[in-house]
Image (tube, rainbow, N blue to C red):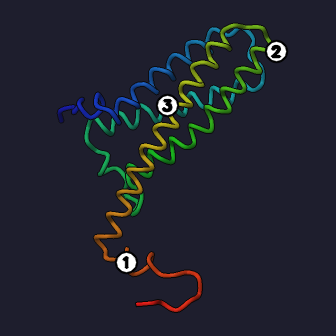
Amino acid sequence: MPLVLHRVLSWPGSLKILTLVMTISLMITLANVKISPPGTSLVWLAVGLSFFFDISFIAMLTTERDSQLFPVRGVTYFTAETAVSLALLVFYAIAFVLCINSEEMTDDNWFIASAIFALINTILFACNTVLFLRKWLAEHRQTLNEAGLENDIFDQNSYGSPDEA
């Protein structure tokens, strides 16, 4: 099966490459820290989850299995990408704060570099969340329109007054 690299090198997929590069950079900076305060384990958890999901989503995109690998009805690639991006956005925001606080506790400059990479990843995952949330909403609207449910269910008046048809 040939790899389809243009999906990863074009705009939505290239965001996965950027987050993977920032995650690896964060791994390198965290590995150079001499003293690890207790909050560092949460930062490592965020890095590990991000690495796992970035590799998984890149593999799905390059092998074009993003529409085949979700057997649960209603869970699409866009749904999974939005949920994972939102969770990692929260994890990296917490990791940014923990890295800043760890630098104040230990006076280790590697935590400043880690905080910068965590902040960049927070911004990238925020962009990823917004991008795939918009794609998921468009897909959801298209599904409702194809089923003929858009006008029947969602256009009803909810104020209790009779319809003026």
SS of the residue under disc 1: helix
Q: Secondary structure at mark 3?
A: helix
Percent coordinates x, y for residue 65 in the rendering = 28, 44
Q: Amino acid at mark 2?
A: Met
Q: Quadrant of residue 86?
A: top right
Mark 3–mark 2 Cα distance, whole angstroms, equals: 27 Å
Task: Give the class, few, some or many, for how many residues have Cα within 10 Å of label 3's Cα (few <14, many ≥20).
Answer: some
The x and y percentages for residue 119 are: 59, 25
Q: Amino acid at mark 3?
A: Leu
Residue 16 horizontal/vertical position (percent): 40, 31
Residue at the image position 51 percent from the left and 43 percent from the top: 84
The crowding category of the residue bearing disc 1, from other C-alpha atoms within 10 Å (few below 14, some 14 to 19, many at least 20), is few
Question: How dense is the environment of label 2, judged by Cα within 10 Å: few (below 14), some, or many (20 and up)?
Answer: few
Q: Nearer the viewer, mark 3 or mark 1?
A: 1
Task: Give the vertical position of 87 relative to 34 (above or below).
Answer: below
**Residue that label 2 marks:** 105
| Residue at the (31%, 70%) spot, across then down | 145
Q: Secondary structure at mark 2?
A: helix
Amino acid type of disc 1?
Answer: Asn
Q: Are marks 3 and 2 in contact (CB under 8 Å)?
A: no
Image point (27%, 34%), residue name: 7
Side of 54 where 126 appears, left or right = right
Q: Residue furthest left?
A: 2
Numbered label attached to residue 151: 1
* Left or right: residue 36 compared with residue 119: right
Q: Which residue is mark 3?
A: 124
Lower position in the chain sequence, tag 3 or tag 1: 3
